[in-house]
Amino acid sequence: MNGLFSLPGYEGKSFSPKNSKERLVEPVLEKKTKIYWLFILPGCIFLAVFMLIPLFTLIIQTFFDEAGSFSLTGYLSLLESTYFKQVFGRSIRLSLISTLACGVLGFPTAYYISKYSKNKGMLMALAVFPMFTSPVIRSFSWMVILGKKGFVNKLLVDIGLVDKPLSLLYNEFSMVIGFIQLFLPLMILSLIGIMDNISEDLNLAAGNLGASKAKTFRYVVLPLSIPGLVTGSVLVFTGCLTAYTTPQLLGGTDTRVLATMIYQQAMSLGDWTQASVVAVIMIVVTMLVSSGINAVSRKLNPTL
């Protein structure tokens, strides 16, 4: 009877092992679902109270003036400001340069650690060591190294390359150096995580088919490493664009970026509305650039 049977008093009602199993499993699934929500509910509440609500409050207040009326004056005045355009352009430029530099330096480093290093654990520890030190300490270290009486200028003067110390601090150069040291570990870790999953059999297969090491790297290793490169690029760019301590210490007061401009508007000038507008623009730009990097990666590797 197609897996169905009848019992006295239950005529017209069908019973099957499948239906019985479903009735037994449903209460268990409901119980697991309740337990699951009990675990994630505190995290959701914390996320909503300390992140989402303040973020939405910040965004909403930028669209109203002091009288409580809807207004875009804050955005329009900021976008017309020459000073903001300079700061915005500098922030994007330095973030892109630092991201590119981290990619160029991090890719070969990660590849060596992943494929050729015999002391992988030690090298990874050395690579991520800067992440465990304070940004203030790292920045002050570069101030000592790049200062007019620092090691670099002293060396350049001693060997006769320059007549007087160069201004290597409180400019875009020193900020890029600080960004690279700060965020290069993120790029390396992102790439190592992907490269470790690239099977050596693929390299061997490419070699057996007559591909050179350069072609194997170009057509096998590089395309498969794009997800790690994309992840690292997004992390580095976002970190550079939103960093405050490094630009404040190494950039000085004359080389402002968006993060230091927010502090200047809020704490020095007392213009919290304008500071909020800058913060919203920073959030939007970060999301747009991250989406752009992902779009480019999909074109380079359609399997993503």
Image (cartoon, rainbow, N blue to C red):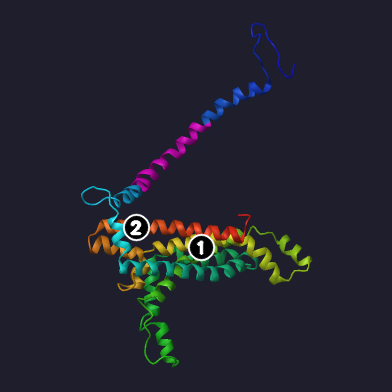
Q: Residue at x 70, y 67 (%)?
A: 216
Residue 30 makes an appearance in the image: yes
Q: Position of residue 179 (x, y in %)?
A: 43, 69
Q: Mark 2 points at which residue?
A: 279
Crowd class of label 1 (few under 14; some 14 to 19; many from 20; radius 10 Å): many
Q: Residue 221 carries which label?
A: none
> For the residue labelled by badge 2, is the local secondary structure a helix, a strand or a loop?
helix
Q: In which quarter of the image is the C terminus?
A: bottom right
Q: Residue 162 sits in which quadrant?
A: bottom left
Magenta stretch prevailing secondary structure: helix
Q: Distance between the residues labelled 1 and 2?
A: 21 Å
Which span of residues is magenta-colored? 32-53
- Please identify the residue farthest to the top as the structure is shown: 9
Would you place residue 300 above or below residue 56 in this image? below
Q: Where is residue 234 in the image (x, y as percent from the top left)?
A: 49, 60
Q: What residue type is labelled 2?
A: Ala
Is residue 219 magenta-colored? Answer: no
Q: Which residue is drawn at 39% across and 74% down?
A: 172
Horizontal side of 301 relative to 69 (left or right) equals: right
Q: Name the residue under label 1.
A: 233
